[in-house]
Amino acid sequence: MARQTRCLACGAPVGRYRATCPVCGAVQPQKRIGSTIGLGVLIVGLLIFTIWAIVRA
C-alpha cells in the first residue's frame, strides 16, 4: 500500500508522490529524496578521493 499524505488545500488523502490533489487539483510539494541521496553520495565520494590523494602524496 502506498503511503499517503493530506492535501495542504483541502485535506483529502493524496498519494505521496502525486504532483496534484485528485480532489481539488492543488499542487503538492514534492519530496526530493533522490537529490538528497545524490548529494550525500557526492560528498562521501569527495571525502574518499581527498583522503586517497593525501595518503598517496
Image (cartoon, rainbow, N blue to C red):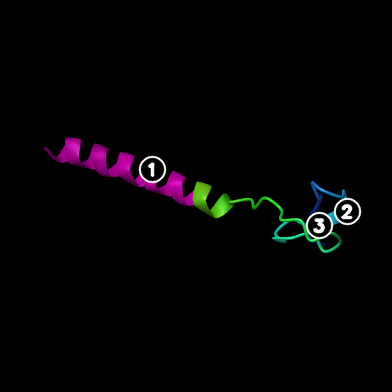
Q: Main secondary structure of the magenta part?
A: helix
43 drawn magenta: yes
Under tag 1, what secondary structure? helix
**Disc 1/disc 2 C-alpha distance (Å):** 40 Å
Is 13 on the left-hand or right-hand side of 46? right
| Circle 3 SS class | strand
Q: Which residue is mark 2?
A: 12
Q: Which residue is mark 3?
A: 14
Part of the protein shown in magenta: 37-57
Which residue of the protein is positioned furthest toward the left in this rendering?
A: 57
Earlier sequence position, callout 1 versus callout 3: 3
The N terminus: image quadrant: bottom right
Q: Along the horizontal axis of the image, is 32 left or right of 53?
A: right
Residue for point 88% across, 53% down: 12
Count of marks placed on residues:
3
Q: Quadrant of residue 50?
A: top left
Q: Label 2 sits on what residue type?
A: Ala
State the separation of the CA atoms marked 3 and 2: 6 Å
Q: Is residue 40 magenta?
A: yes
For the residues bearing labels 3 and 2, Cβ distance under 8 angstroms: yes
Identify the residue position indicated by label 1 in the image.
44
